[in-house]
Image: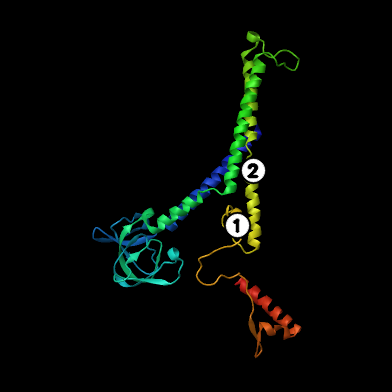
Amino acid sequence: MTVEAYLFFLVIAISAGSNFTQTLQFYKLSKVSNNIQIDVIRNGRRQQISIFEIVVGDVICLKIGDQVPADGLFLDGHLLQVDESSMTGESDHLEVNSSQNLFLFSGTKVADGYARMHATSVGMNTTWGQRMSQISRDNSEQTPLQARLNELTSSTGKIGLAVAFLVLVVLLLRYFTGNTTDENGNQEYNGSKTKVDDIVNVVVGIVAATVTIIVVAIPEGLPLAVTLTLAYSMKRMMADQAMVRKLSASETMGSATTIGTDKTGTLTENRMKVTKFWLGKELVKEADASSVSPNIIKLIQEGIQPAAYIGKLQ
C-alpha cells in the first residue's frame, strides 16, 4: 500500500471515530434528559421510578409540573388541571375529576393540583404513542420526486449491469479466441503456451473494467444535486418567512396555492406595524401620520434604533 492509501485510511478512521463518539455522547445525554422520575404506588409501596418502567396497573402520583407518563383513569385528587395542548392544540387547562372527566392521557402536563391515577395503557398503546407511530409511518412514504429518482436510479443501474455483463462476455470471448494482441502485436492467448499468471492478469483487468462500468452507471451525484436544489428552495422560502423543517416538504409547498390550518385564533404575518403612537401629549394615528413633520419623524427613528439595538443585546 502507498502512503496516500495509509493517509486515506487514517482520515476515514479518525472521521468515523469522531462521529461515533459524538453520536454516543448525544445518545447518553438524551437518555439522561429523558429519564424522568415519577412517584408510583406498586405492590402497596410508594416508590420513585423512571417513566419508562411504568406498567399497566401502577398507581401514579401526579403533582404540578409532572408529565402524565401513561393513559389512565383519575382515582382521587384535589383541583387537578391538565394542559392538553400537546394533544388538542388548545392552551386552556382542562379540569379532571371523578364526576365529569376522569380520563388522563400520556404526553399531557399537570398545570395545577395533585392527583393519583391508575395506568391503563403504556408505551405505543397510548393515544400519544399511536399518534407518533402514525407520524412515523407517514414520514416513511416517498414523495413523487423521490419515487421518480429511485426509479431512474434503479433503471440506470439495471442498464449498466446489462451492459457490463455484455462487455464481460465479449472481452472474454475475444481473449480466449485469440483475437487480442499485446503491445508488440503478438497474440495474447495461445492455448497451453500462455502462462497462467498472464491469463489471471488479463481476466482480472477485464473484470475490473466491467465493475467500473457498473459503478459509473449508477448516478450517485443525482440525489446530491436534488438535495442541493431543495436546500436552495428552502432558503428562498425562509426569505419569505416560510419555515420549512424538512427538505422534502419544499417539493409539495412549491405547488401549494391554498393552505388550510387548524390554528385557533389569529394567523399573523410576523410583521410589526405601528397603528398609533403618542407625540408629546398628542395621539397620532396611522391615517394622521402624514401630518407629522419630517424632522420629528427623523428624531423618532433615531431614538428607535438605539433602543432596538440595546434590547437585542439584552
Amino acid type indicated by mark 1: Met
Q: Residue at x 46, y 66 (%)?
A: 89
- The location of residue 258, given as percent across then percent down, is 59, 62
Q: Quadrant of the C terminus?
A: bottom right
Question: Going by the image, does 84 lie left or right of 175?
Answer: left
Q: Nearer the viewer, residue 198 or 279?
A: 279
Count neighbours of disc 2 (C-alpha within 10 A) and say few if under 14, some if 14 to 19, many if 20 or more.
few
The disc label shown at residue 253, or none: 1
Q: Residue at x 61, y 29 (%)?
A: 162
Amino acid type indicated by mark 2: Leu
Q: CA distance from mark 2 to mark 1?
A: 21 Å
- The location of residue 280, given as percent across then percent down, is 66, 89
Which element type, helix, strand or loop, lies under badge 1?
helix
- The image shows residue 177, relative to residue 5, as above or below, that is above
* Quadrant housing residue 206: top right
Question: Can the viewer see residue 39?
Answer: yes
- The image shows residue 186, relative to residue 116, as above or below, that is above
Which element type, helix, strand or loop, lies under badge 2?
helix
